[in-house]
Image (cartoon, coloured by chain):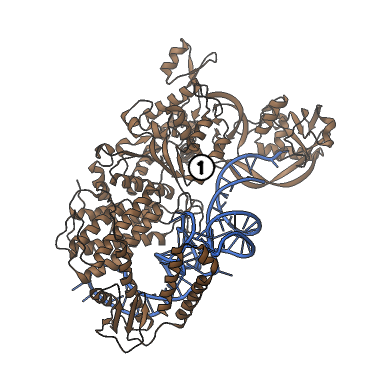
RNA sequence: GGGUGUGUAGCUCAGCUGGUUAGAGCGCUACAUUGACAUUGUAGAGGUCAGAGGUUCGAGUCCUCUCAUACCCACCA
């Protein structure tokens, strides 16, 4: 097994490329990604990895998710919990099929020429290939997931789960077949769920057509060929006389019989106030037809072409038919008027092809129907799970969005006519009997010798991913894993799939297992480019996470994704930002390098070392303060805040102050090593590679399974005393710089301070590079904090500084004279204000 | 049409339940530098907290309105 190199003197700069793969290997071989190998007394902590589509490459959105998930998993593992992060991939039916079809198109063929089985073989080959890529990329991110439990939505076991879910729902009457208007993508040759439809704003033409004695306005004239009704508002005086009449209409010779009816839904003021109703190609019109008993005529087929019912326009595409019909209407003088109309064009979310609403027989999940024996519908189950507080959504505002969506949910169309997906477990006998069964064999038992045909359709890809948290743990078997690890702890995902996925997981888990799929939903925002634009291939502003890892290292990329982004808020990523965190990682490396090179022996310090000086007390106090704050932040999903704090401690406290003082005071081996050890544990969830690489120098096992430290009590006065020292040093340096005294010059200086004793004044003088005088100089002293300083400078406080201070003092004085302030403000605030005033006056 | 965010230094963003002279990183300016680190150090400049009202002893923080901007949902023929 390749051991990470143990260098006696570490390289001057951290080189991620030399370490990352080796470290990952070390972790993987240690077996600790698998919770079964972690201490048995730990409570399970479980994250189901949102399965990336098995179509190729990882983008920054995935990278961000992985960074958060790994952060949580590593933190909980360090805290002693049995952390399970279950990885996997999604077969992503439409997305994958579309991808492979594009490849076939380049080869000059298509799926119909290949045939179903050959085509599916091609897809399988393609998927196997890209799954390997994805796995590699997930590892590159440092993800500590349990590969021994990796799953794929198309695994045999998961397909069993899909069939089981379908059958159970069918038996409960929650899945039914019905003829309804569906969203049809003529290119994908499939239905789409309502939320798979996107809208593109466009300026459409609104055509006014003479329609017998009426005038009708429409954006889709070609559909008028299958009109069977005209809807008007019941209170529209213009049309009152027509209501109830049956009209014979000729559209440039194409004969229609239409019934005029009144409905409140019709807006008198839009267009002409009269709507031609096409029941087979509009959801609203279909409802009209059911309500008012209209005939339904299909006009457009699955390829978007006109059927024989369209008469002479038969065989044309809808757009061709539109053009031809408009021309004919113009000739016959029936095209009365044209207007521009802003509206939205519905398109397929995968291929952006305009959607054709069609009447079609499909399978649906009934969301409003009561579940037998439970007195609740699926919709109500999903609503309750969040409303009751059992599932917490972060940030909270997304709960509102969730409720709104659930409340407006319609029956879910789950059948797809594409080939790549789980076949619907429904069989038909020759005489049309429907048999729902998990396999052909089982179906045959019920068929009593009749020949069977399986439904040609496949299931919506979200149907299988809705089962993900438990199908991956063995359901419908009652496995140990399912008992132990479900419900999972956190679902971490992007807010863009809250409806597609999060809501459906809740529905399915509640229905099938009577429990929630997870306790907390943590939603991250979208990663955008420097200008806040969506990253996309077509614009070419996308950043490839793997490129960034090559350039800056994984740890730097992870930090740049974690720090500075709030849950649910979009964030921007660009190279300078990542470079900044690369610098931080290098800083951490060099801090360690310094400590290792300066101590007599590199060893683990188990006991809290004794502080000998104020600086020692201070750094230990700061560290325990940090541990407390970070633990609180991480327990409450404030990842960015925790990251900022460790960054600040490492660079601004440890490196800039403590190490500099350690160089002067000396004899601090145990404290330096102790602080470093804790620091490595605290940084590990953020920057796993560099922290582990450094830890390996101790030769004491694997950092990944070390113990997260407990915050100890600390004396806060130590921190304020030390800040006295810090302020003194900074002020002296400032005085020197402002007075153009070279850093190499040491001006004479006498200091009086009530808090700091002489040894600390000497320390301050060394840090500030001044020469400590033994007696007061013959000068006016300056007041800095609680110090009085006699220093040999040509200049004192600048005019601007003086002005600012005077203004500040005036403000405080006014406040202290204000009766209502004195009467209303709490005593401690008044005390504070008085103190501030004294200090400020002292300075002047 | 309905809803939800966001607007704080040149840029990217913190600022929790209202109470130090509003912070950080990058960038900028000046200076420094062979011993952990130039992927560095020290110091500095830079903000009427989008605007207008209001509540309060006190508002970046709470309320109302306006403007700008992003996204989500619904879709009208």
Q: Chain of mark 1?
A: A
| Image location (x, y in percent) of residue A8 | 17, 60
Give the chain coloured blue: B
Which quadrant: the N terminus of chain A?
top left
Q: Count of labels shown?
A: 1
Asked if residue A280 lies left or right of residue A404, the reply is right
Q: Is residue B36 above or below residue A782?
A: above
Residue extending farthest to the left is: A600
Q: Is residue A745 visible?
A: no
Q: Is residue B51 above or below residue A485?
A: below
Residue extending farthest to the bottom is: A778
Q: Is residue A707 above or below residue A786?
A: above
| Image location (x, y in percent) of residue A672 | 22, 61
Give the chain coloured brown: A
| Residue at point 47%, 29% (across, down) | A115
Quadrant hosting residue A440: top left
Quadrant hosting residue A729: bottom left
Query: Viewer-proximal residue, A313 or B35?
Result: B35
| Image location (x, y in percent) of residue A145 | 32, 42
| Residue at point 75%, 46% (across, down) | A339
Label 1 sits on a secondary structure element that is helix
| Image location (x, y in percent) of residue B61 | 53, 58
Q: Is residue A434 above or below residue A516?
A: above
Q: Is residue A31 visible?
A: yes
Asked if residue A303 lies left or right of residue A465, the reply is right
Query: Viewer-proximal residue, A610 or A242?
Result: A610
Dot 1 alpha-carbon crowd within 10 angstroms: few under 14, some 14 to 19, many 20 or more: some
Which quadrant: the C terminus of chain A?
bottom left
The residue to which callout 1 is attached is A399
């Amino acid at each position: 097994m390749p051991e990470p190199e143990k260098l006696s003197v570490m390289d001057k700069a951290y080189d991620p490329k030399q370490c990352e793969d080796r470290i990952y290997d070390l972790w993987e071989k240690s077996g600790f990604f698998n919770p079964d190998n972690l201490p048995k007394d730990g409570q399970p902590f479980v994250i189901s990895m949102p399965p990336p589509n098995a179509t190729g490459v990882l983008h920054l959105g995935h990278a961000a998710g992985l960074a958060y998930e790994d952060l949580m998993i590593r933190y909980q593992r360090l805290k002693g919990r049995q952390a399970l992060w279950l990885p996997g991939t999604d077969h992503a039916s439409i997305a994958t099929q579309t991808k492979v079809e594009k490849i076939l198109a380049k080869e000059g063929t298509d799926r119909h020429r290949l045939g179903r089985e050959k085509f599916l073989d091609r897809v399988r080959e393609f998927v196997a290939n890209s799954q390997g890529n994805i796995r590699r990329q997930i590892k590159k991110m440092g993800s500590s997931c349990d590969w021994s439990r990796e799953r794929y939505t198309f695994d045999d076991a998961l397909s069993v789960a899909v069939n089981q879910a379908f059958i159970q729902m069918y038996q409960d009457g929650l899945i039914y077949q019905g003829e309804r208007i569906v969203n049809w993508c003529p290119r994908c040759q499939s239905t789409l769920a309502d939320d798979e439809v996107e809208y593109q704003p466009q300026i459409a033409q609104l055509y006014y057509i003479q329609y017998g004695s009426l005038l009708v306005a429409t954006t889709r004239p070609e559909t008028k060929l299958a009109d069977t009704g005209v809807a008007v508002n019941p209170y529209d005086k213009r049309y009152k006389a027509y209501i109830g009449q049956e009209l014979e209409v000729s559209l440039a010779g194409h004969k229609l019989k239409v019934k005029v009816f009144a409905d409140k839904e019709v807006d008198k003021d839009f267009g002409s106030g009269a709507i031609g109703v096409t029941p087979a190609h509009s959801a609203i019109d279909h409802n009209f037809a059911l309500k008012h008993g209209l005939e339904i005529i299909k006009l457009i087929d699955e390829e978007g072409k006109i059927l024989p019912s369209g008469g002479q326009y038969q065989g044309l595409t809808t757009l061709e038919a539109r053009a031809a019909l408009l021309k004919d209407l113009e000739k016959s003088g029936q095209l009365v008027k044209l207007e521009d109309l802003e509206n939205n064009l519905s398109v397929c979310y995968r291929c952006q092809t305009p959607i054709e609403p069609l009447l079609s027989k499909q399978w649906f999940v009934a969301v409003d129907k009561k579940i037998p024996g439970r007195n609740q519908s699926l919709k109500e189950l999903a609503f309750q799970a969040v409303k009751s507080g059992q599932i917490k959504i972060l940030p909270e505002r997304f709960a509102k969005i969730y409720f709104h969506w659930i409340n407006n949910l319609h029956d879910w169309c789950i059948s797809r006519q594409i080939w790549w997906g789980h076949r619907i477990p429904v069989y038909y006998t020759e005489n049309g009997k429907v048999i729902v069964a998990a396999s052909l064999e089982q179906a045959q038992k019920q068929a009593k010798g009749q020949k069977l045909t399986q439904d040609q359709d496949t299931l919506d890809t979200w149907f299988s991913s809705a089962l993900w948290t438990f199908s991956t743990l063995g359901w419908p078997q009652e496995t140990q894993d399912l008992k132990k690890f479900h419900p999972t702890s956190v679902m971490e995902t992007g807010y863009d799939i809250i409806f597609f996925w999060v809501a459906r997981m809740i529905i399915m888990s509640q229905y099938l297992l009577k429990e929630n799929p997870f306790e907390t939903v943590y939603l991250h925002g979208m990663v955008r480019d420097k200008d806040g634009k969506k990253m996309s291939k077509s614009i070419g502003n996308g950043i490839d996470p793997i490129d960034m890892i090559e350039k800056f290292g994984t740890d730097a990329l992870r930090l740049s994704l974690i720090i500075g982004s709030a849950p649910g808020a979009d964030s921007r990523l660009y190279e300078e930002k990542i470079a900044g965190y690369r610098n931080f990682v290098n800083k951490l490396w060099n801090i360690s390098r310094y400590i290792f090179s300066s101590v007599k022996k590199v060893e683990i310090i188990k006991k809290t070392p004794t502080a000998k000086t104020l600086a020692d007390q201070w750094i230990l106090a700061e560290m325990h303060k940090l541990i407390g704050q970070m633990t609180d932040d991480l327990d409450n999903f404030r990842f960015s805040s925790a990251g900022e704090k460790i960054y600040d401690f490492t660079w601004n406290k440890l490196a800039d102050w403590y190490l500099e003082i350690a160089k002067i005071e000396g004899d601090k081996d145990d404290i330096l090593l102790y602080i470093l050890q804790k620091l490595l544990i605290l940084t590990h969830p953020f920057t796993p590679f560099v922290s582990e690489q450094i830890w390996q120098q101790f030769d004491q096992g694997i950092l990944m399974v070390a113990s997260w430290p407990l915050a100890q009590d600390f004396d806060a006065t130590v921190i304020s005393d030390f800040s006295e020292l810090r302020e003194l040093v900074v002020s002296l340096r400032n005085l020197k710089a402002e007075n153009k005294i070279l850093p190499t010059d040491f001006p004479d200086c006498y200091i009086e301070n009530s808090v700091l004793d002489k040894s600390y004044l000497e320390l301050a003088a060394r840090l500030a590079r001044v020469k400590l005088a033994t007696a007061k100089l013959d000068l006016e002293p300056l007041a800095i904090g609680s110090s009085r300083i006699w220093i040999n400078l040509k200049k004192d406080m600048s005019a601007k500084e003086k002005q600012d201070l005077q203004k500040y003092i005036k403000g405080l004085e006014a406040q202290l004279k204000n009766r209502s302030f004195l009467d209303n403000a709490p005593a401690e605030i008044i005390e504070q204000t008085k103190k501030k005033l004294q200090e400020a006056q002292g300075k002047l």
